[in-house]
Amino acid sequence: MHKNFDTQKMTFRKILLLCLACMLLAACTSKSSKSTATLPVPIPDETAMITELVELEVSGEPADEVVDVQVPPADDAEPLSSEELEALETRLNINIDMDESDRKVVEQYFKYFTHRGRKTFQRYLSRCGALLPHATEIFKQKGLPEEIVYLAFVESGFNAKAYSRAGAAGVWQFMPYTGRKYGLKQNWWIDERRDPYKSASAAADYLLKLYNDFGDWYLAIAAYNAGEGKIGRAMEKTGAESFFELTQKNHKLSHKARLRKETKHYVPKFLAIVKIMRNLEKLGFDPCEGGACEPIKAIKVKGGTDLLALANDLNIRWKTFYDMNTAFRRQVSPPDYEATVYVPAVKAAKAIAFLQSDKSRPYAGWISYKVRRGDSWYRIGRKHGVPVAVLKKVNNRRSNMLKPGQRLMIPGSNSTQVAWRSPRAKTHAIAQKRGNYVVQKGDTLYGISRSSGVSVKTLLSANGLRSAKLLRAGTKLYIPNQSKRTVARKSSKKKATKTVAYQVRRGESVWTIAKKFGVSYKDVLRWNQLSKRSVLRPGDNLKIYAN
């Protein structure tokens, strides 16, 4: 009896250990696996010339980066022409009360966009198309000054596909919470912050609310950038009554309460852009011709509509259709509510006819999946690239239990085609195309950082790398702001090495010493005939071949 009891006890322990092992394995697998259905992640970028917004790649085409200027922008040492000086003195409809230092910042941004950043600003103008007239009309209807609409140039350069590294999105760069507060839906299927028409109305409402809070348009604009709480607290602590007075008293605030340089320069940058927009012809810019754009009509689609099938029926390439409908994150509309789709006005009747036909019935193009023995929500979701939460929602299931023979509705091969790959994967692919340095054997990211003058964090971000450990000899690396010739010249200096007799200090390891000298961990082991298990002690002497 005792023997049987002990045997049962041992069997129970084995089963328990086996279950724990399976759970740990599943957890590790879920962390390491990359799902094509994951939500986009803001991409951090450079420190000197900040790549603030990134237009994500669609259908394999390269991403278009929207590069924010330095704060403040660098001076090109060229004087302003008489036409530029005249444009700079343009009086605006909104009263301005600022000192000479503030005027100097306005001039710096004005000069940047008309000189060094001229191509950047022209790209903004070419992108605004019908979006600017639409936003202007909305702002006018809601009673906002016409000039406030130009804030979209400051926020994103009218880039409807943009995500910021902080998580803001779309033309008006709404943060997730603020976007939801103003009626912009965000989920696995759609991100209406990237709907340039709906977000323009939400931006007008938000700006009007901020103006009512502060009674000053410049404070409202600053609050749009920094948040009303930040501006409100700063006003209260300084006793300032206007934005420019607040910037002059900013030094009196605690370090945490002070306005960031980005916020201090946000309004001057806006003013510079307004002055440019008022004088496009005089400054030699091609105008933003909204009238030349094809008229767009908004139509409602039922939940689960196959958008790819709709585009094909209208004889529109998916990329063209997606450019008109940047809010959609999948090639199928959200399954549980009606969504808005934008199509060329001349094809609206045909689109409505398609939506009324059997071809557009909800979930057309989806597949019916029969649950098999051993299946789980996680396994099925991973196989089809759909999060478990989404699978459960579209199938109206809450339980984790699945029975063999059950039928589940899963987005099919067409519908699950994601509008973009993960941002990091696309960044890596683009970096490979424009790579200006080939990684050599023994290279470390720290060493390349030292030789190129670009931070390790920037190198990781610019190449879509999670970790410096992913660096492989023979692969291309993109080093920002470096020509191939410059990188080659800097890398050639690396060959000139010197021998250093290094004495180990308390707390140091082979890895920390290798990082200190910008050399490979394995090289330090090889140079000193050490193994991975070797223990360093304070006072030990190591031989290092450093640059």
Image: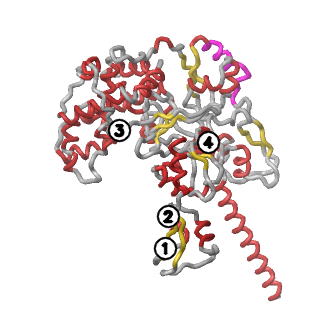
Earlier in the chain: of badge 4 and badge 3, it is 3
At label 2, which amino acid type do we have? Phe
Image quadrant holding the N terminus, namely bottom right
At label 1, which amino acid type do we have? Tyr
Earlier in the chain: of badge 1 and badge 3, it is 3
Residue 259 lies, with reference to residue 349, above or below; the image says below
Residue 112 lies, with reference to residue 445, above or below; the image says above
The mark closer to the camera, 2 or 4, is 2
Q: Mark 2 points at which residue?
A: 517
Q: Name the residue under label 3.
A: 225
CA distance for labels 4 and 3: 34 Å
Earlier in the chain: of badge 2 and badge 1, it is 1
Q: Mark 1 points at which residue?
A: 502
The mark closer to the camera, 4 or 3, is 4
For label 4, the crowd category at 10 Å Cα-Cα, with few meaning under 14, some 14 to 19 and many 20 or more, is: some
CA distance for labels 2 and 1: 10 Å
Check residue 143 for magenta coloring. Answer: no
At label 3, which amino acid type do we have? Asn
Secondary structure of the residue carrying tag 4 is helix
Q: Which residue is drawn at 70% across and 26% down?
A: 361
Secondary structure of the residue carrying tag 2 is helix
Q: Name the residue under label 4.
A: 432
Horizontal relation, residue 424 to residue 453: left or right: right
The mark closer to the camera, 2 or 3, is 2
In the foreground, 185 or 318: 318
At label 4, which amino acid type do we have? Gln
Residue 144 appears in the rendering: no
Check residue 359 for magenta coloring. Answer: yes
The mark closer to the camera, 1 or 3, is 1
